[in-house]
């Protein structure tokens, strides 16, 4: 999916390239997602250090292990999301270059390991933790979708070098087949 669009109504009849990524990260929508993500990180930290700690102590057997596992996964997921948001903000503010942002982004893992809601004992976890897990996955899904949309589109030269065009290959085969019949 390309993040670059051509605008036909450009001045003097020329096409203008518009980068979705640049437009998005300078938009109010990005600011809202940034604030939402950072607020979720803060709420999660407060919960895990306060009420969550008390609730975890009252859990019996496997529920305690599941709580520890899911709280670690939640924390890791939120750290990755916060890193992504901070990289995008730093790029927007001119604190880092596009190349630096791409390099840093490659280190951020936006992988969503299986949703725990189907795991045995998940419903025994405190509602506070389950709510934060669900919010983190909702934010993860949005940021992952934005990340895919904002990835740099490859230059036209590199597209042709990366993989052969199957349609062009078929057209070439047809041209050769019909050219030999005409001669």
Image: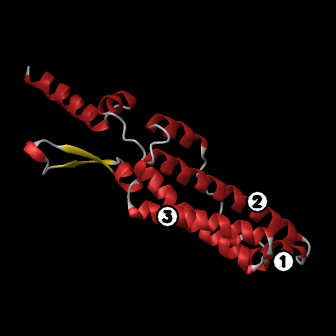
Q: Nearer the viewer, residue 179 or 139?
A: 139
SS state under label 2: helix
Query: Which residue is drawn at the image coordinates 56% and 40% (left, top)?
Result: 104
Disc nearer the start of the sequence (1/2): 1
Q: Which quadrant of the view contains residue 47?
A: bottom right
Q: Please give the residue where the numbered disc 1 appears in the rendered image.
A: 55
SS state under label 3: helix
Q: Residues within 10 Å of mark 3 (few under 14, many from 20)?
A: some
Between marks 1 and 2, how big is the CA–CA gap?
Answer: 16 Å
Query: Which residue is drawn at the image coordinates 88% and 76% (left, top)?
Result: 59
Query: Which residue is drawn at the image coordinates 66% and 76% (left, top)?
Result: 131
- Give the foreground label among 3 and 1: 3
Residue 111 in view: no
Tag 3 near tag 2, CB within 8 Å: no
Between marks 3 and 1, how big is the CA–CA gap?
Answer: 29 Å
Q: Please give the residue where the numbered disc 2 appears in the rendered image.
A: 72
Q: Please give the residue where the numbered disc 3 appears in the rendered image.
A: 33
Query: Which residue is drawn at the image coordinates 73% and 73% (left, top)?
Result: 129
Q: Which quadrant of the view contains residue 180?
A: top left
Residue 38 in view: yes
């Amino acid at each position: 999916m390309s993040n670059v669009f051509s605008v036909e109504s450009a001045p003097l009849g020329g096409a203008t390239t518009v980068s979705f990524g640049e437009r998005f990260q300078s938009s109010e929508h990005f600011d809202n997602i940034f604030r939402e993500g950072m607020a979720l990180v803060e709420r999660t930290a407060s919960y895990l250090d306060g009420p969550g700690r008390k609730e975890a102590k009252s859990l019996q057997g496997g529920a305690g292990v599941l709580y520890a596992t899911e709280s670690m996964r939640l924390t890791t997921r939120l750290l990755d999301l916060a890193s992504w948001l901070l990289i995008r903000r730093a790029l927007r503010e001119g604190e880092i270059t596009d190349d630096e942002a791409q390099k840093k982004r490659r280190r951020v893992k936006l992988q969503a390991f299986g949703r725990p809601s189907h795991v045995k004992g998940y419903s025994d976890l405190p509602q506070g933790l389950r709510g934060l897990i669900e919010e983190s996955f909702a934010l993860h899904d949005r940021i992952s979708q934005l990340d895919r949309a904002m990835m740099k589109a490859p230059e036209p030269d590199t597209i042709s070098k990366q993989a052969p065009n199957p349609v062009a290959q078929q057209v070439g085969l047809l041209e050769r087949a019909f050219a030999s019949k005409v001669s």
